[in-house]
Amino acid sequence: MVQVKEALFLILQKSKKTPLVYQDLEESPGLVLGEDIKADRDYPPFNRSRMDGFALSTGDLKNASPSNPVTLKVKGIIPAGSDDSRELNKGEVFKIMTGAPLPRGADGVVPLEDSSWQEDRARFIYKIEAGSNITFQGEELRKGEITVRKGIPLGSGEMVLLAMAGKKKVKVYSPPRVGILVTGEEVVNIGENLAHGKIRNTNGFMLAAQTKAKGGIPSFLGLSGDRVEEIKGLIAKNLPYLDVILTTGGAGGGDYDLIEEVFSSLGANILFRQLLIKPGHFTLGAWKEDKILVGLSGSPAGAFVSFELLVGPLLKEMQGHNKEEGNFEEARLKGYIKGGFSQDRYLKGKAFVDKGTIRVEAKRGGITSFVGVNSLIYIPRGEGPFREGDRVKVILINGLSL
């Protein structure tokens, strides 16, 4: 039996990064960037107006006041998208739209609501400072500056920066291919006859959802009875096309727990056999060449927890993700946890923000308790009980933004 940290170290030590590929930008959201992206020009590439208003020389308004209004000639209109070859002379203004380039000679913009105009004349009663309401060239980014760093998953903000840098294609890590095999004579597919003593396959769908949330591509290998040759055959057939194999069920030490025998018969090396936690105690890790095999518990809670603690960080590591997974956050407990457990516990939790503080409630019960789970509450061995408002450590799942 090993601690979670040791098990994760052993798995990561044998894992490999997935191949880098060039992907069309529109097909890249959610993938992890495999290169630093630099700005191909200053941004903005010119001095531009932050709002609709009048571009002018602020010196023309140095004496403006409500009792001494200043009237200037409106030379024309500069819409967004026009060139920046316009030139402003003393005593003149240009009506300018948001995002439009500033004319030469202008060093400030007066908002439309702070002025009045009629035909070719504009009237001002307030002076402004030089630079007012202008975004200057290169204010956000300079040419050659890194805009998005390698190892970042591409969300909406990153896509904005890549498009701004003119990247039609980007180098990204291929999503890990994850095979999911559910074992157990009692498990049947959805739509099949649910005879007495049988249960529907739920773990397969749960693990597929978890895999996708971590950036992997799940592939369901089917159901298998408790027979070594059947399980072995399904894994051997699919292993060449996958990066990770997950099994659920058969990872313990009972008469029908056959996963260690299967992994060994495939020529895989066993890394660990059990974890010093609950749920998820019966978790088996192995590797064969450049493939990782993880035997998860048949218990939905055990499979869920072990996936989040081991498989999730593995998939992120394989994609070159530069954000460390599994970091603890501090939260205030809602409710009560008895504590005093003989092994470390990871309880399903629902975290939320209350008046700027992360709070978390333990989700107890069977299958129905999985709805709304977005965290794991860590209860160290022997500690507790924990009461309303006590500090507890939590792992937020899937980069939960609080």
Image: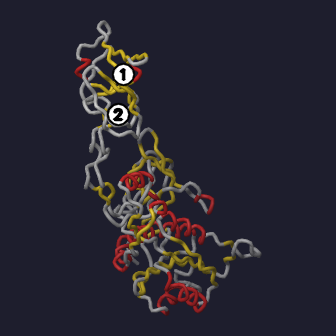
- Quarter that holds the N terminus: bottom left
Q: Amino acid at mark 1?
A: Val
| Number of numbered tags placed on the structure image | 2
Asked whether 72 or 347 is in front, the reply is 72
Q: In this figure, which residue is indicated by the disc labeled 1? A: 74
- In the picture shown, does residue 86 fall above or below 283? above
The residue lying furthest to the top in this view is 67
Q: Amino acid under label 2? A: Ser
Q: Label 2: which residue?
A: 49
- Label 2 Cα neighbours within 10 Å, binned few <14 / some 14-19 / many ≥20: many
Considering depth in this image, is 181 or 274 the residue closer to the camera? 181
Residue drawn where x is 52% and y is 66% of the image: 212
For the residues labelled 1 and 2, the Cα–Cα distance comes to: 17 Å
Give the left or right position of residue 266, taking residue 109 as reference: right
Helix, strand or loop under label 1: strand
In which image quadrant can residue 372 be found?
Answer: bottom right
Of residues 107 and 217, the one drawn nearer to the viewer in this rendering: 107
Indicate left or right for 338 with 60 as reference: right
Q: How is the image coloured?
A: secondary structure
Image quadrant assignment for residue 270: bottom left
Q: Secondary structure at mark 2?
A: strand
Q: Position of residue 213 (x, y in %)?
A: 50, 63
Earlier-in-chain disc, 1 versus 2: 2
| Rendered image: mark on residue 15 | none
Question: Is disc 1 surrounded by few (<14), some (14 to 19) or many (20+) residues within 10 Å?
Answer: many
Q: Pinpoint residue 241: horizontal percent, then vertical percent.
A: 50, 82
